[in-house]
Image (tube, grey):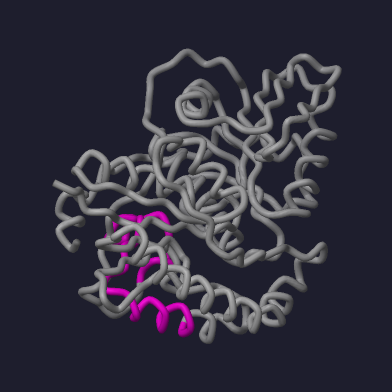
Amino acid sequence: MQKKRILVAALNWGLGHATRCIPIIKALLKNDYEPVLASDGDALRLLKKEFPHIICLELPSYNIKYTEDPGNLKWKLLFDSPRILNVIKAEKKMTQGIIRDYQISGIISDNRWGVRNKQLRCVFITHQLQVLSGNTTYFSSKIQQKYIEKFDECWVPDLPGSKNLSGILGHLKTENSAIKYIGPLSRIEKRSLPIVYDYLIILSGPEPQRSFLEKRLLDAFKDTEHRILFIRGVFSVEEMSLKNTNINIRNHLYGAFLQQAMNSCKYVIARSGYTTIMDLYKIEAKAFFIPTPGQFEQEYLAERLEKLGIAPHCKQENFSLEKLENLEDFSGFSNFSFEYPFRDLFTLF
């Protein structure tokens, strides 16, 4: 008997959307579904690496790039909106072809607005029911909510109620039966391992801000005596090496290797991207956040977590080693172990 095929599509904006789809893909396999994966760029490369035996298809690229001046990002996205709308139209048309060619029975789309079809049950995954964009937040949130309404269900990878990770991003004042809180999604599991590194540095996100932060951190730690694992978050065959042997540099870590690294460090330094926050929540880590300049969501999450006493943060241009001195004054993350059973979620299909 042919297993039901579910199309799982992830947005390529950093690697977070692809990585948080990994536990969903594994759950589909475990529950006797056959996932078909779709994305573009680095996100697609990551999915191919994690699931070499699963069909992986390329979708049109949104090609969202950051500006060098963070203050111009919102206006660049606004300027790019006609092109993005064309990409949504193209991926919607391509989705129809994928459904026909691969006999798809249902769709799970992580922030890809055009990957849907009226003839099938379709799910949208997002932690952003509200999209923070400064003085245009009301309009960006309404656009997001309008697109979400085109899907049968919206799965929010967070906890319901006041003890949650996403705050106002993932929680509206009015209830909606189509919204399901499925618990934080992470490919990382907590393990009891000896401490090998003082700091694990995880870089992520679009250029040029990733490179700006990389340079700043390498300059700050160049003479350090701390043991550091520095994950650059790039797909490159060229390895970087430093004279300081206390700093172990890797371009990227996958699966079990990343899990081992995260469980064998004292502290994590990272962007305050939501996928990273979910990973740190899973392993109950202590962290220091440096939000991507100009990305309102990351700035909000970093500020919120500091106010809650969970993790400190600073702006990228203000980072120095002295900023790390008060890490022990913060509680770190606590895992409340909430999880919506995937078997129940998949009955939609």
Q: What span is in magenta? A: 142-171
Q: Quadrant of residue 320?
A: top right
Residue 27 falls left or right of residue 93: left
Which residue is located at x 20 percent, y 55 percent?
A: 346
Residue 149 falls left or right of residue 89: left
Q: Nearer the viewer, residue 47 or 96?
A: 96
Residue 171 vertical placement versus 250 (above, below): below
Percent position (x, y) of residue 90?
53, 75
Percent position (x, y) of residue 240?
79, 27
Screen quadrant of the C terminus: bottom left
How many marks can you see?
A: 0
Percent position (x, y) of residue 29?
26, 41
Which residue is located at x 51 percent, y 85 percent?
A: 138
Q: Nearer the viewer, residue 335 or 80?
A: 80
Which residue is located at x 61 percent, y 67 percent?
A: 62
Percent position (x, y) of residue 39?
51, 56
Q: Quadrant of residue 207?
A: bottom right
Residue 194 vertical placement versus 44 (above, below): above
- Residue 154 falls within the magenta-colored stretch: yes
Q: Is residue 309 visible?
A: no
Which residue is located at x 38 percent, y 55 percent?
A: 8
Q: Nearer the viewer, residue 88 or 208?
A: 88
- Residue 210 falls within the magenta-colored stretch: no
Taking the view exactly as shown, the residue that stands out farthest to the front is: 101
Q: Is residue 237 visible?
A: yes
Residue 326 vertical placement versus 165 (above, below): above
Q: Nearer the viewer, residue 269 or 5?
A: 5
